[in-house]
Amino acid sequence: MIKGLHHVTATVDDARDDYNFYVNILGQRLIKETVNFDNENVYHFYYGNETGLPSTIFTTFPYRDQGVRKGVIGTGQVFETAFSATEGSISFWKKRLQDHRIEVKEEKRFERKILVFRDPSGLNLSIFEDANDLREPVWLTDGISADHAIRGVHHVTLAVESSVETIRFLEEFGYDQVQKDRHYTMLSVPGGGAGNSLAVMGSDKLPAGINGIGTVHHVAHRVASIEDSLKLKAWLEEQHGINVTDIKDRNYFRSIYFRIPGGVLFEVATEGPGFMADESREHLGSSLKLPEWQEPHRERIEANLKPYRFP
Ligand code: ZN
């Protein structure tokens, strides 16, 4: 039932720094501007490719000045989010990031080049070369050509204290082991690859992760329908004794949430209705969108949000 990744969601610091980094430096398109459905004083930004295709989506809650502590990246969390770019583009990204005074490190993982860096909130990010990623390149920004543009999230790396139990669960959940490299194991849905993969990193040296600013909150996987979400919920509860939330209406998808063995928070999100439910392709992300139940409070909500776009 699991078709691959849907999105990754992180708790970040300042809205302006966040928007500047993901749009102006990484070249992502802001495809939806809304607010945290549980805290109307906090934006919810969705970045993605031009159409907001599930698996290209990276979302942030900029929590500065909201009394949220800085988190600790560690076990039981998404440790790193890898974005996908074509083969040969690492040198371009290395120079671009360094020109913006961002520290980068080149590594080899799974026999491929990977460029490791951090976003302004301290999130671990990377760019992973994949010649087989056929998704449309992400919205083009000045100085980024289609050859080098990011194509979406490639995979996330889950950090767990001991990987055996987590990997066994993921295999039953729908991901198959495809490659091993030292303490990393790559898993993909059948036919998987970019946007449909997870890496598991076993580490007994990392601290336990603490949720907060500068950490990934959860990773979402996609399913075709609510019926599939309900079947998964029943399977998780009956076969694994895992507590699963009821279905939540996220306006652009419907979701359930639960923690997997190893502690990472997972979401299962439907592919529909999608980000064009309330905006045309051309206008995605161009104005504040609110769910129906918050619309009557638009004036108050807008007055409390600080502007974040600048030329
Ligand atoms: Zn989510």
Image (cartoon, grey):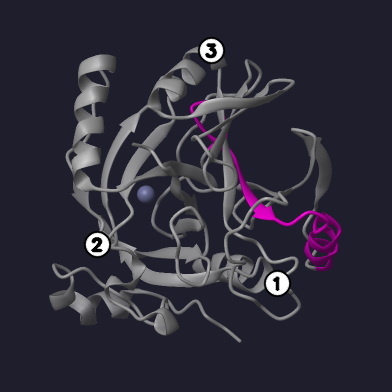
Task: Please identify, in this view, whether the residue under mark 3 or under mark 1 is nearer the observer.
Answer: 1
SS at circle 1: loop
Number of marks? 3
Task: Mark 1 vs mark 2: give the one in front.
Answer: 1
Mark 1–mark 2 Cα distance, whole angstroms, equals 31 Å
Can you give x and y, in whole percent of width and height, for residue 193 in the image? 59, 42
Q: Quadrant of residue 120?
A: bottom right
List x then y, in percent, for residue 155. 58, 42
Q: Which residues are drawn in magenta?
A: 72-99
Q: Quadrant of the C terminus?
A: bottom right
SS class, disc 2: loop
User: Who comes first in sequence, dot 1 or dot 2?
Assistant: 1
Determine if residue 41 is in view.
Answer: no
Q: Amino acid at mark 3?
A: Val
| Residue located at (39% from left, 27% from top) | 173
* Crowd tier of the residue under label 2, counting other residues whose Cα lies within 10 Å: few below 14, some 14–19, many 20 or above: some
Q: Residue furthest front?
A: 191
Would you name the residue on which mark 2 appears? Answer: 251
Q: Which residue is mark 3?
A: 164
Q: Position of residue 151 (x, y in %)?
A: 61, 60
Compare residues 48 and 61 and report the one nearer the observer.
48
User: Contact (CB < 8 A) between labels 3 and 2?
Assistant: no
Label 1 sits on what residue type? Answer: Ala
- Does 241 sit left or right of 19 as displayed? left
Q: Nearer the viewer, residue 259 or 189?
A: 189
Q: Residue at the spot x=29%, y=16% of the render? A: 240
Across and down, in percent, residue 20 comes to: 60, 71
What amino acid type should be assigned to the residue bearing mark 2? Answer: Asn
